[in-house]
């Protein structure tokens, strides 16, 4: 078997290679074994695996997966960008993303959709420590806190914050943001990634979060949430019903308490 390295694109054999992952890093354990830390190529999932369970994927399969999400984005953009969405007093977005690749894609998405957004690549573990200063600097109407997440033990420990890879950091980041602005209508917040601890993130003060059914969300889902809040009139109350059909798996992946829109005249 070819020796795996950071940046390789792989699938987990025991899971039927159902998710395409990028090798983020390889850890050497005390017993002379190695495990790979994995991040989803198009999904906001983080996982680990023994190297023996990983297989390099065919380039055609990788291109096909990337093409599907690009087609989804293009279809959404074609529906939305009809000449009206060009910074027309829409709300400003501050987007913190733990994935550098997704950060670059997010910048392009917001630009294409016509929304004024500042995107920062900040690791999930650092987000709680920088969010206040970034909020003070950019003064956004909408805050997106995302990256990668995942349950460590699937199907159990749903109410154990330590059974989630990054949910505790998302919770802390939302709490810090709410210390900066406690009014949930003045600052709209989305937080979470794949399989995140939805209830804890909402309780911390988010307006929308993932993932009620502890399922996967893809790269673009958090952006669609931010977009719908930013473009909605300030007198319009935005609920999950307004955009659930644009999400990968509707309310199973993302839900929330709602918020008033951020468009001003």
Image (tube, helix red, strand yellow):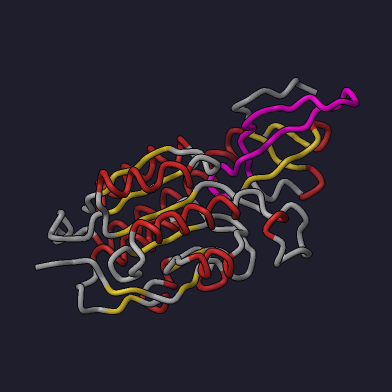
Locate residue 257 relative to residue 88 in the image: left or right: right
Looking at the magenta stretch, what is its main secondary structure? strand
Name the residue at the top extreme: 3
Name the residue at the left extreme: 265
Figure disc tally? 0
Q: Residue at x 30, y 79 (%)?
A: 237
Q: Residue at x 58, y 66 (%)?
A: 200
- Residue 131 is a magenta residue: no
Q: Residue at x 75, y 21 (%)?
A: 2
Read off the magenta span: 20-44
- Return the residue nearer the eye: 144 or 22: 144
- Return the residue nearer the eye: 260 or 248: 260
**Which percent across, then down, holds residue 94?**
32, 50
Locate residue 22 relative to residue 50 in the image: left or right: left
**Which percent across, then down, holds residue 166?**
60, 49
> In which quadrant of the rendered image does the N terminus lie?
top right
Seen in the picture, residue 208 relative to 78 is either above or below; the reply is: below
Among the 4 quarters of the image, the one containing residue 181: bottom left
Among the 4 quarters of the image, the one containing residue 52: top right
Q: Residue at x 9, y 68 (%)?
A: 265
Among the 4 quarters of the image, the one containing residue 33: top right
**Which percent across, then down, holds residue 180?**
35, 56
- Return the residue nearer the eye: 146 or 134: 134
- Residue 24 is a magenta residue: yes
Name the residue at the right extreme: 31
**Which percent across, then down, holds residue 81?**
22, 58
Locate residue 243 relative to residue 234 in the image: left or right: right
């Amino acid at each position: 078997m070819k020796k795996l390295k950071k940046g390789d694109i792989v699938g987990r054999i025991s899971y039927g290679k159902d998710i395409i992952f990028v090798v983020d890093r390889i850890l050497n354990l005390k017993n002379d074994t190695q495990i790979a830390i994995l991040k989803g190529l198009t999904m906001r999932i983080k996982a680990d695996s023994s190297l023996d369970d990983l297989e390099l994927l065919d380039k055609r399969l990788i291109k096909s997966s990337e093409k599907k999400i690009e087609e989804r984005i293009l279809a959404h953009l074609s529906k939305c960008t009809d000449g009206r969405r060009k910074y027309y007093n829409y709300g400003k977005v501050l987007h913190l993303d733990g994935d550098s690749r997704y950060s670059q894609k997010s910048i392009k998405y917001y630009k294409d959709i016509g929304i004024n957004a500042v995107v920062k690549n900040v690791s999930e573990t650092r987000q709680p420590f920088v969010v206040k200063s970034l909020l003070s600097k950019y003064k956004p109407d909408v805050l997106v806190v995302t990256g990668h997440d995942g349950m460590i033990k699937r199907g159990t420990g749903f109410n154990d914050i330590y059974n989630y890879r990054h949910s505790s950091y998302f919770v802390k980041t939302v709490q810090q943001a709410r210390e900066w602005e406690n009014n949930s209508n003045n600052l709209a917040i989305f937080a979470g990634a794949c399989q995140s601890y939805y209830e804890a993130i909402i309780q911390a003060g988010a307006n929308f979060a993932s993932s009620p059914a502890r399922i996967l969300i893809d790269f673009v889902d958090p952006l669609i949430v931010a977009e719908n809040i930013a473009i909605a009139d300030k007198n319009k109350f935005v609920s999950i019903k307004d955009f659930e059909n644009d999400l990968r798996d509707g309310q199973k992946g993302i839900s929330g308490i709602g918020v008033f829109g951020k468009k001003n005249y």
